[in-house]
Amino acid sequence: MTNGSPYILLAEDDPDDCDFFCAGMKRFYPQVGIHTFQDGDELLEFLDKCTWPSLPALILIDYKMPRLTAPQVLQATGAGTRYAHIPKIVWSTSERQKDIDECLSLGAVRFAIKPATGYELNELINSLEAWLIHGGGCGNVRMA
């Protein structure tokens, strides 16, 4: 599924948010590929076809999508699955503590508020370096 370079899976049903993120990633990390999906079902179908060495470096999931939501994707890719080791970040326009707590308890390494400006997008993308380049993360961190 990949040529050996790290890549991200992005499940996002808003085309503008998807384009915004992809453009920012291309600017900072042109070597990192991005596979985009309209919903969690498509993302899970893709993951099921991946072999172990070709799994993504990171999964970014919109909190509220049609069909499968971020919490449902987190459950399907969490503890006890072959995807449990993949860092998962949920992003949303919601700042509801209940949503944040739910996603973190289901294994998300971060809950990020969707960036509204280019500066906020740059901050979010730069914070992904630990997972994309170094293969590690900073634990359960809420980024607003």
Image (cartoon, grey):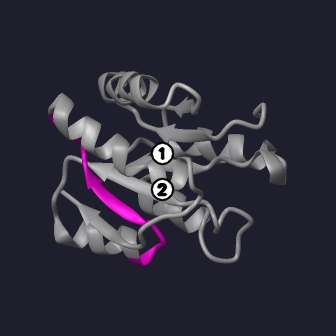
Magenta highlight on residue 111:
yes
Residue 46 lies in what quarter of the image?
A: top right
Instruction: Choose top left, top right, bottom left or bottom right for residue 49.
Output: top right
The residue mark sitting in front, 1 or 2, is 2
Vertical placement of residue 109 versus 119, above or below: below
Disc 1: CA contacts within 10 A as few (<14), some (14-19) or many (>=20): few
| 114 w.r.t. 30: above or below | below
Mark 2 belongs to which amino acid?
Ala
In reply to whether residue 59 is colored magenta, the answer given is no
Which segment is the magenta one? Answer: 105-116
Residue 91, x across and y down, in percent: 32, 50
Q: Amino acid at mark 1?
A: Arg
Q: Which mark is residue 89?
A: none
Question: Which residue corresponds to mark 1?
Answer: 67
Are the residues at dot 1 and dot 2 in contact (C-beta closer than 8 Å)? no
Q: Is residue 80 above or below residue 25?
A: below
Q: Residue at x 37, y 63 (%)?
A: 110
**Image point 42% across, 72% down: which residue?**
139
- Is residue 134 rendered to the left or right of residue 48? left
- In which quadrant is the C terminus drawn? bottom left
Secondary structure of the residue carrying tag 1 is: loop
Question: Could you say which is closer to the camera, residue 69 or residue 31?
Answer: 31
Could you say which disc has been placed on residue 130 in the image?
2
